[in-house]
Amino acid sequence: MAADPSSSHRLATIAVTAGRPDKTPDAPLNEPITMAATYVAGGDVEYGRYGNPTWTALEDALGALEGGRCLTFASGLAACATVLDLVGADGKVVVPRHAYTGTIMQLGDLEARGRLRAEMVDITDTDAVVAACADAALVWLESPTNPALEVADIATITAAAHAAGAYVVVDNTFATPLLQRPLEDGVDLVVHSATKYLAGHSDVQMGAILTRDDELYAVLKGRRDLLGAIPGPFEAWLTLRGLRTLHLRVERAQASAQELVRRLGEHPALSEVRYPGFGGIVSIVLAQGEVAADLLSRKTRLWVHATSLGGVESTLERRRRWKAEAPTIPDGLVRLSVGVEDVEDLWDDLRTALDGCVG
Ligand SMILES: *Cc1c(COP(=O)(O)O)cnc(C)c1O
């Protein structure tokens, strides 16, 4: 694999160039899919669970974008579980009460089995979060949160956590490395559900962890080797292919989200529009609550009613249809994942559906 040729390049160029084979005559431009459970003995890798050239190409590319070393996993939650495994017996984890439901459920499961303690915080209340850091082993940040879209003061919280000797991890799934690079703020670890924007086409499940700390990298690589939550080579290839257009997709989704937010603000069916100012996710709250939100999910023709987010196709979902979603998320909140379709078509479809949800 070529040494990173792109360190002086901007992120859009890195997304296109990083993780390519060396430019030698007749070399393929793209890293091939290597299907291999084992390798001829005597090398550095030896076995399929320990490494794969297609993973490495993706890890080089994503690592260059986030500014750290990357390990890929079978799913976002496999990456989250591997980070939580760093916490020692009975260690305390500080976590946003509105973090992704799967993360909250993992923490609840570990806590119920006496493995660790979780303290839920309002991530926008920086003073309270800083106070909670005092005896923490790990501070878990998700910013913006899913689906409340709250934003954390990452730099201030990280300083407090480090003063207390705690690790800090940021789930960067919503912002992507194009809009937020937490490792530059001194955060120890970044996790991704690559299933979302990084792969970007709703056809892959994959996760990733990034760090600048070589010791942490070695520990996490050791966990992946032993636990075996490795990605498939084809999935790694698809994610790398998706990553090549990340900047175009995120730019378009963000521009359309900003335009939709301007127009949605006036709509009488809504009591609230939540948007952190960046990214492609918007949460709207239907004034008539759950029933109107479910009606909206059935009325759109272009927007697909589906969970997940960050794909080229626009999707929407009432989050409280999941029992595990926090009770502090409004019943009538619908999360919109803005895709890359024409914004006028997205608006026409959404407005028509919303018109049918007014009181
Ligand atoms: C989807 C998601 C995850 C979990 O990722 P999977 O790939 O579904 O396992 C973690 N964090 C956030 C913010 C997510 O949206």
Image (tube, helix red, strand yellow):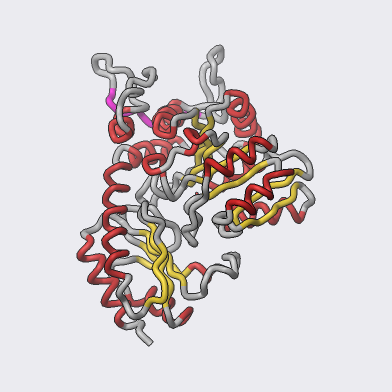
Q: Nearer the viewer, residue 291 or 74?
A: 291
Residue furthest toward the top? 42
Q: Is residue 339 magenta?
A: no
Q: Is residue 61 shown left or right of residue 232?
A: left
Q: Compared to 322, does 309 lie above or below?
A: above
Name the residue at 60% across, 52% down: 103
Q: Is residue 25 shown left or right of residue 184?
A: left
Q: Is residue 41 shown left or right of residue 135?
A: left
On the rendered image, what quadrant is the C terminus found in? bottom left
Q: Quadrant of residue 87?
A: top right
Q: Quadrant of residue 58?
A: top left
Q: Compared to 235, does 125 lie above or below?
A: below
Q: Quadrant of residue 295?
A: bottom left
Name the residue at 48% across, 38% down: 182
Name the residue at 32% across, 42% down: 246
Could you say where residue 215 lies in the image, as x and y percent from the top left?
A: 62, 24
Q: Please state the extent of the stretch shown in magenta in the rendering.
A: 28-36
Would you say the magenta stretch is mainly helix, strand or loop?
A: loop
